[in-house]
Amino acid sequence: MLDHKIADLKKWDRAELIEEWELLWKYKIPKSISRQLLIRSIEYKYREQENGCLSESCRKELNRLVKLYRKNPGKSLRKSLRIKPGTKLLRIWGQETHEVLVLSDGYLHKGKTYQTLSQIAREITGTRWSGPLFFGLRKDKEKAA
């Protein structure tokens, strides 16, 4: 039934679509919205009514991404690394095993607090490293290709 309702939207004229959009979204339509976007946003509302709204965690993640994008529109929105506080990361380098404790506001290594894993990786190796890559939390792009 929902699929038929959505398919029918393509047959509607612009005035009907605008009326439906304003009914569903509860405010006036933006002036420059295209017909395709109009149909897709109505479709979204139909699906939302049928299946329910986004989960709270999904809504929070979307809001986080919107804030990141507005702050720096050209920057990648790749999901940031999130590790739960209390997690221990282990890395053997040379003859030594390095243990890092994830804190809510950074990382603890050998009694010293760091803001990033990259700082710790540099401290261990003496060279610049991606911290998540060094600790095995991300794959090397070159190896993945």
Image (cartoon, rainbow, N blue to C red):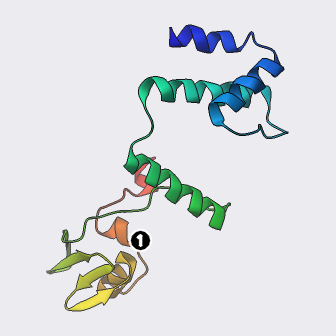
Q: Is residue 87 visible?
A: yes
**Residue 58 on image: x %, y %:** 42, 47
**Residue 100 on image: x %, y %:** 21, 77
- Would you say 64 lies left or right of 7 here? left
Q: Circle 1: is it few (<14), some (14-19), or many (20+) Cα within 10 Å?
A: some
**Residue 22 on image: x %, y %:** 71, 32
**Residue 70 on image: x %, y %:** 65, 62
Q: Is residue 77 visible?
A: no
Q: Which residue is mark 1?
A: 130
How many marks the image carries: the answer is: 1
Of residue 120 and residue 77, the one placed in the foreground of this image is 77
Location of residue 128 with respect to 140 vertically, above or below = below
Quarter of the image for residue 112 reads bottom left
Quarter of the image for residue 128 reads bottom left
Residue at horizontal 57 percent and vertical 29 percent from the top? 45
Residue at horizontal 82 percent and vertical 21 percent from the top? 15
Of residue 113 and residue 19, the one placed in the foreground of this image is 19
Element marked by disc 1: loop
Residue at horizontal 71 percent and vertical 40 percent from the top? 27
Q: Tell me the kind of residue under disc 1.
A: Ser
Of residue 116 and residue 118, the one placed in the foreground of this image is 116
Residue at horizontal 24 percent and vertical 83 percent from the top? 108
- Would you say 21 lies left or right of 141 here? right
